[in-house]
């Protein structure tokens, strides 16, 4: 048992006992952390609203045998503008959900933590939601070693006749390597996805393009396939992608 100082982003929480809440936090140093916030569900909780989901916090934790306990907390970034926009909240929630499904406990996650932080900051600055989410998920797939091939055939490396996309095959497939189970993308979508994969989230302030629903739907399906888990975020209600 020990006391440690840490920072993180609150992904979600759930009730624990009569007045407590278990928080699921992504920490750059310790991956996914579960910590109890004592009395946080009481009206006069000393933590107030400092442990709400999607809040970047500085923490002091007491590590028990099973769960850590929050003993001190200070807000680093609360993202107030984001919280006033329902679409932005849905996109942010989907980002947090996706991160929660790929980050494990006690495994340093600096890259994923910074990716989520940049995504939340971009939403706070008013970035377009669907294209930003597609870009975020493409970068998340890269962070876990599952990025789709968007500029060459995933099977043979060819850079021409790239007419099909395969979830199982890992991205674009040329006509010669197409063995079925692929589908053709809408015109311009391949180039759009490549731009989103290379985009800097820190400067992502452009509005959504007309390809945004197709982009986020495709990337969602790709990520779900490779993490073997569905993403239920409401942000996907307008972006189902090809079927």
Image (cartoon, rainbow, N blue to C red):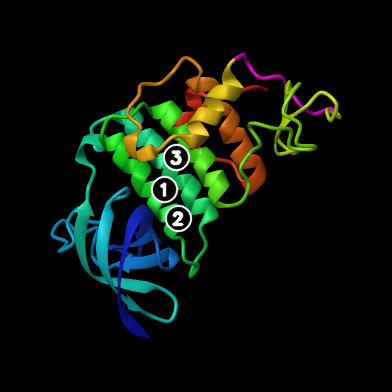
On the question of residue 88 being in view, the answer is yes
The residue closer to the viewer here, 196 or 237, is 196
Crowd band around label 3 with a 10 angstrom C-alpha radius: few (<14), some (14–19), many (20+): many
Measuring 51% from the left and 57% from the top, which residue is drawn there?
A: 103
Q: Which residues are magenta?
A: 180-187
The residue closer to the viewer here, 46 or 126, is 126
Tell me the tag on residue 111.
2
Report the mark closest to the observer, 3 or 1: 1
Crowd band around label 2 with a 10 angstrom C-alpha radius: few (<14), some (14–19), many (20+): some
For the residues marked 1 and 2, what is the alpha-carbon distance in whole angstroms? 6 Å
Tell me the tag on residue 115.
1
Residue 184 included in the magenta stretch of the image: yes
Marks 1 and 2: CB-CB under 8 Å?
yes
Q: Taken as a whole, is the magenta stretch helix, strand or loop?
A: loop
Whether residue 15 is situated above or below residue 192 in the rendered picture: below
For the residues marked 3 and 1, what is the alpha-carbon distance in whole angstroms? 13 Å
Tell me the tag on residue 207.
none
């Amino acid at each position: 048992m020990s006391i440690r100082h840490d920072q993180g982003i609150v992904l979600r929480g759930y009730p624990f006992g009569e007045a407590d809440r278990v928080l699921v936090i992504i920490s750059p140093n310790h991956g996914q952390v579960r910590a109890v916030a004592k009395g946080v569900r009481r009206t006069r909780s000393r933590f107030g609203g400092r442990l709400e989901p999607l809040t970047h916090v500085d923490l002091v934790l007491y590590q028990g045998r099973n769960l850590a306990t929050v003993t001190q907390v200070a807000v680093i970034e609360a993202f107030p503008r984001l919280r006033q926009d329902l679409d932005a909240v849905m996109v942010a929630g989907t980002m947090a959900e996706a991160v929660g499904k790929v980050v494990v406990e006690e495994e340093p996650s600096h890259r994923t933590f910074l990716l989520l932080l940049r995504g939340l900051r971009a939403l706070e600055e008013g970035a377009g939601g669907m294209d930003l989410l597609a870009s975020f998920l493409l970068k998340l797939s890269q962070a876990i070693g599952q990025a789709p091939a968007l500029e060459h055939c995933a099977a043979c490396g060819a850079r021409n006749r790239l007419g099909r996309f395969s979830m199982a095959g890992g991205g674009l497939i040329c006509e010669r390597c197409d063995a079925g189970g692929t589908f053709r993308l809408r015109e311009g979508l391949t180039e759009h996805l490549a731009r989103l994969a290379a985009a800097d989230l820190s400067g992502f302030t452009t509005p959504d393009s007309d390809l945004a629903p197709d982009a986020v739907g495709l990337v969602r399906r790709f990520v779900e396939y490779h993490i073997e888990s569905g993403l239920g975020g409401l942000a996907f209600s307008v972006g189902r992608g090809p079927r």
